[in-house]
Image: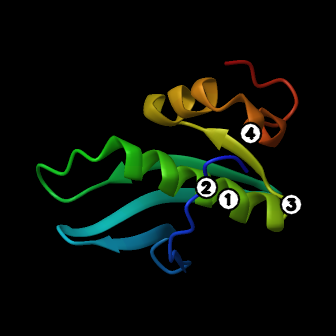
């Protein structure tokens, strides 16, 4: 998609989170699965980490993983809802009936 900078992401299925490492530490997005839907529930960053541009790019990379795996994405966290509003190209990943 537009403006995507590829990030090395580990899908830690045991911890149910996508992980990547930045200079300050580990950045993760927690998830849960139900049928063919992935529920994005929480973003964890190192203390005082405030690189919103990186977080947005990390979420874009996760959306690409969802596209590859043919998952629908359910944003639980308000910050991820805002991501969908700012990046309408990914709205096709939302399950039917989800309105933002």
* Neighbourhood count class around disc 4 (C-alpha, 10 Å): few under 14, some 14–19, many 20 upward: some
Mark nearer the viewer, 4 or 2: 2
Q: Viewed as shown, does residue 50 lie left or right of 5?
A: left
Tell which residue pokes out farthest to the top in this image.
100
- Residue at 54% across / 33% down in the picture? 83
Of pointers 3 and 1, the one earlier in the residue sequence: 1
Q: Nearer the viewer, residue 67 or 72?
A: 67
Q: CA distance from mark 1 to mark 2?
A: 25 Å
Mark nearer the viewer, 2 or 3: 2
Tell which residue pokes out farthest to the left in this image.
48
Circle 2 is placed at which residue position? Answer: 4
Please tell me whether mark 2 sits on a helix, a strand or a loop. loop
Please tell me whether mark 4 sits on a helix, a strand or a loop. helix
Circle 3 is placed at which residue position? Answer: 70
Question: Which quarter of the picture shows residue 5?
Answer: bottom right
Of pointers 4 and 2, the one earlier in the residue sequence: 2
Of pointers 1 and 2, the one earlier in the residue sequence: 2
Do the numbered discs 1 and 4 sit on residues whose CB atoms are within 8 Å? no
Circle 1 is placed at which residue position? Answer: 33
Q: Compared to 24, does 96 lie above or below?
A: above
- Residue at 84% across / 23% down in the picture? 97
Please tell me whether mark 1 sits on a helix, a strand or a loop. strand
Q: Quadrant of the C terminus?
A: top right
Circle 4 is placed at which residue position? Answer: 90
Mark nearer the viewer, 1 or 2: 2
Do the numbered discs 2 and 3 sit on residues whose CB atoms are within 8 Å? no
Q: Position of residue 22 (x, y in %)?
A: 28, 70
């Amino acid at each position: 998609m537009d403006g995507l900078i590829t990030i090395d992401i580990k899908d830690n299925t045991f911890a149910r989170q996508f992980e990547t490492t930045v200079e300050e530490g580990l950045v993760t997005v927690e998830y849960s699965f139900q049928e063919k839907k992935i529920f994005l529930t929480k973003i964890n960053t190192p203390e005082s980490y405030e690189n919103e541009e990186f977080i947005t790019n990390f979420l874009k990379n996760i959306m690409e993983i969802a596209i590859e795996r043919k998952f629908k994405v359910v944003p639980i966290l308000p910050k991820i809802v805002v991501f969908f509003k700012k990046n309408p190209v990914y709205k096709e990943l939302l399950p039917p009936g989800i309105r933002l």
